[in-house]
Every structure is written in C-alpha cells, then in structure tokens.
C-alpha cells in the first residue's frame, strides 16, 4: 500500500524552475515537496548557460540565494559581436539607461538553491522513479516509486517544472494543448576549460564557417561554442580540433588573444524553439523548459524559467494569502506574453548569427544587410540591448 502524504504544492523537477519555485513558496509559508527523477549530483553535472537578467538576479535575491551570486557573478555592461574580421560593441548600459546582465553559471544557481532548500529543511525526493500525475482537474495526486516502495502525494496544485522531456506536459490530453516548434538544422558544440576568457566581454561571432561564441564562467574559466552539424558528436572532436576551429571563426584580435587548454567538458546541443499553450490545466501549471524552449543564442532559457516562476509564485501566494484566484487565472497569459517576446528575440539572434544550411544567396545577403544595419543604427542596437538585458515586467 502506498504511503499517502499531503502538501499544498507538489513540484515535479529539481532544475532551476522547480528549485526556485520551491524556495519562494517555502519562504511564503506554502508547504511544498519537490519530486525529481535524477540524483542531486546528476542535476548539478549538467552544464548550461549563465547569463542572468537583472530581474532574475532580483528574484534570486527575493528567494534569499543571491549571496554567492553577488560575490562571484560578473557584471557585463555590454557584449561584442564579430563579423567580417571586425569586432563591434553593443553597450547595454548606455543603450538601456543603465541596465546590465550578470554572468553566473546556471549550475551555480542550481547549487545555491539546492543548498538553501536543504538547510531550511524543505523536502526534496531525488531518484523518484515512474513519476505520474493524476486528477489535476479536481484533486491532484502525484505517484512515484522510491527505493522500490510506492508513494502517493495528495496536493492542491502540481507545478510541472520537469523540463522538455518531462511527464507533466505529456500527461495533458492532446486536445487541450497546442504546441509550436522549430528545430534548427545545426547544433552547438560547447567546450568548458580552466582558461582565462579571451575578452572581458562575451563575443558572438558570425563567420562564413559558422557561428562561434566566446563566453565565460569566471575570470579563470571559459565556455566556448562553435556551430556544428546536427549529426556531430562531441567525442569525435579533439580539444585541438575545437580550438583550431574556434580560432578560424573569431576575429584576428581574438584569435591572437585566445588562451587554450584541456577541456573539462565537451558536448553538442540541439537548437530548438518550442512553446506549449496554455500553461495551466486546472490545478496543473507548467513552468520553464516544460512549457518552452529557446535556442541559446539570446541567453534567455534560464531567465524565462525565472520569469514563469515569478508569475506562478506570486499567483500561489495570492491564492493562499488573499484567497484570490486572479493570479492563477492570469498565470498562463502573463507568462506566455513574455515567452513569445523572448522566443522572437532568440529566433532573431539565431537567424542573424548562424550559417543557415541551404538558405541560398539571397538569405545570406539579407543577413549581411541586417548586420550592417545593426552596427550602424542606434535604434537597432537599442532593440537588441533591451531584449538581451530583459524586457520590463508589465505588472
Ligand atoms: N519526473 C521527475 N523529474 C523529472 C521528470 C520526471 N518524469 N522528467 C524530468 N525531470 C527533471 C529533470 O531530471 C530535471 O532535473 O526535471 C528537471 C527539469 O530541469 P531543467 O531541464 O533544467 O528545466 P527547468 O528547471 O525548467 O530549467 C530551465 O534549463 O535547459 C535549461 O535553458 C534552460 O536555463 C533553462 C533551464
Ligand atoms: C554560456 O555561457 O554558456 C552562454 C552564454 C550566452 C549565450 C549562450 C550560452 O547566449
């Protein structure tokens, strides 16, 4: 017989969405449990992006987990783009009236959230097998197995924070959900190394051989990417091959300054745009990658997850504290309005910077014209900067 527990909110998935939601609810006195299929170490082993909008930093502060972020995060007041052998600067601070972003790895955000949750004694069940959700239109229940034993959790609400491949979105009847998707015909091969970054800025490179990105985790740890074909696998690239290819794609000054070293991690990521609508089904809410994916070119993945969680945490606090359903009723529409803007920006950045296979000469010239326009127009740069640092919340 399954052991039955009761909580106010059952959260599926201990990625950044689930952990941040759990922390905000816990702080507001809303009882919650996180059910995660993997181990904590596995979750922390995933290397993801690391650019935080100020609104994401503010939310992590509100969650009480921003101390290390403030000590170790790197404030970036602009970014650089390389094209045609030249480097161009997009100065966020000047273009947006003082806004900046913070470079701090998603892995570190996750670690800080996990530690806070553990030290505050909030429940997380790792290595939960066969997680399933039931009756989310009436009296929701979550079931799973742990160490062979069956468990059941009854709750008021379920938060589906279980990423793109999770069980929560997949449990919604097909007729109740509409999805929108674009899979890009190329991937990113990423390399992490214990080397100083090539520049104090991130450098986004458009090159005839394909896109490249010079990023960082700290002043001694770098993250680089090169556009690759979809069938590429990371093991067939030696570190030397990666560094040679990167050097060919960056501008001459960056190629000269590049410090190489052994890789700590190398992996290939697919690029995808995806949105599921709506994000609420009775007492089930989707948040983060469970509901949407952006290609990483706009650095929006984690920020969008945080933006969903911000809306959802406020909605649930309103429900329990003020007995108002207004927030939960508006959750989906509010979250999606922001998501589609980030989808547009991420798609645009991706189209602007990559070599698109078989796009044809016309599309190549349009891309070149778009870059020329961007580098000569303050209005175009302002639009990029406003989107990159994060659009204001309209609430
Ligand atoms: N049951 C329980 N947990 C599950 C299940 C399941 N059936 N399926 C997936 N999970 C877990 C995964 O193991 C993972 O730890 O849900 C978590 C989802 O985490 P993420 O994929 O990191 O998604 P999210 O928390 O929404 O974070 C979004 O991650 O991919 C990046 O760019 C994205 O930065 C963004 C962030
Ligand atoms: C990263 O550092 O991993 C990173 C930075 C910016 C992006 C994507 C990835 O746009």
Image: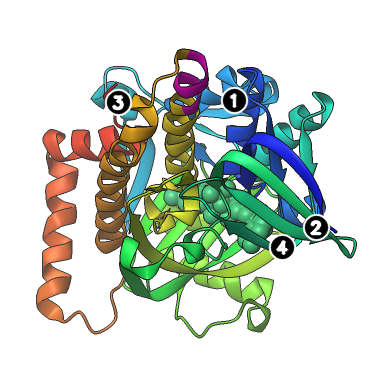
Dominant SS in magenta: helix
Image point (32%, 29%), residue name: 92
Image point (67%, 47%), residue name: 14
Q: Earlier in the sequence, mark 1 or mark 3?
A: 1
Is label 3 or label 2 in front? 2
Dot 1 alpha-carbon crowd within 10 angstroms: few under 14, some 14 to 19, many 20 or more:
many
Image point (43%, 38%), residue name: 308
Task: State whether residue 371 is above or below residue 358.
Answer: above
Residue 366 in sight here = yes
Q: Earlier in the sequence, mark 3 or mark 4?
A: 4
Is label 1 or label 4 in front? 1
Disc 1 designates what residue?
24
Left or right placement of residue 282 versus residue 378 in this view: right
Q: Position of residue 340 (x, y in %)?
A: 27, 48
Q: Earlier in the sequence, mark 2 or mark 1?
A: 1
Q: Earlier in the sequence, mark 1 or mark 4?
A: 1
Element at label 4: strand
> Which quarter shows the C terminus?
top left
Dot 2 alpha-carbon crowd within 10 angstroms: few under 14, some 14 to 19, many 20 or more:
some
- CA separation, marks 1 and 4? 36 Å
Kindly indicate whether the residue at mark 2 contacts the one at mark 3 (C-beta within 8 angstroms).
no
Task: State whether residue 352 is above or below residue 359.
Answer: above
Element at label 3: loop
Q: Earlier in the sequence, mark 3 or mark 2?
A: 2
- Residue 127 — which label? 2
Q: Position of residue 184 (x, y in %)?
A: 35, 72
Element at label 2: loop
Name the foreground residue: 147 vs 109: 147
Disc 4 designates what residue?
263
Label 1 C-beta lies within 8 Å of the nearest ligand 1 atom: no
Disc 3 designates what residue?
392
> Which quarter shows the N terminus?
bottom right
């Amino acid at each position: 017989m399954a052991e039955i527990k009761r909580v106010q909110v059952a959260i599926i998935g201990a990625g950044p969405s689930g952990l941040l939601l759990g922390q905000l609810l816990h702080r507001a006195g809303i009882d919650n449990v996180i059910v995660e299929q993997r181990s904590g170490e596995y979750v922390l082993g995933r290397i993801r992006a690391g650019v935080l909008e100020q609104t994401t930093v503010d939310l992590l502060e509100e969650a009480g987990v921003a101390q290390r972020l403030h000590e170790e995060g790197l404030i970036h007041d602009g970014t650089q783009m390389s094209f045609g052998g030249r480097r161009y600067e997009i100065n966020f601070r000047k273009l947006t009236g003082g806004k900046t972003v913070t470079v701090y790895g998603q892995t570190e955000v996750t670690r800080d959230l996990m530690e806070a949750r553990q030290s505050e004694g909030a429940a997380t069940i790792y290595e939960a097998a066969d997680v399933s959700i039931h009756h989310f239109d009436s009296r929701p229940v979550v079931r799973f197995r742990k160490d062979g034993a069956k468990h059941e959790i009854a709750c008021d609400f379920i938060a589906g924070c279980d990423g793109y491949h999770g069980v929560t979105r997949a449990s919604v009847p097909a007729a109740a959900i509409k999805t929108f998707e674009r899979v890009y015909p190329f991937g990113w091969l990423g390399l992490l190394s214990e080397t100083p970054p090539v520049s104090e800025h991130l450098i986004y490179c458009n090159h005839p051989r394909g896109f490249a990105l010079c990023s960082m985790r700290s002043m001694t740890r770098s993250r680089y990417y090169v556009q690759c074909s979809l069938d590429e696998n990371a093991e067939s690239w030696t570190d030397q091959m990666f560094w040679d290819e990167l050097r060919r794609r960056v501008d001459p000054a960056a190629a000269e300054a590049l410090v190489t070293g052994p890789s700590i991690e190398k992996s290939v990521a697919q690029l995808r745009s995806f949105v599921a609508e709506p994000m609420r089904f009775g007492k089930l809410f989707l948040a983060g990658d469970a509901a949407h994916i952006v290609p990483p070119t706009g650095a929006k993945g984690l920020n969008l997850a945080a933006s969903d969680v911000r809306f959802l945490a406020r909605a649930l606090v309103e429900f329990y504290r003020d007995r108002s359903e207004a927030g939960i009723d508006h959750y989906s529409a509010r979250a999606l309005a922001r998501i589609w803007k980030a989808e547009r920006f991420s798609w645009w950045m991706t189209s602007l910077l990559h070599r698109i296979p078989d796009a044809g000469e016309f599309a190549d010239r349009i891309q070149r014209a778009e870059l020329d326009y961007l580098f000569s127009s303050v209005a175009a740069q302002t639009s990029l900067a406003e989107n990159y640092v994060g659009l204001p919340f309209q609430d």
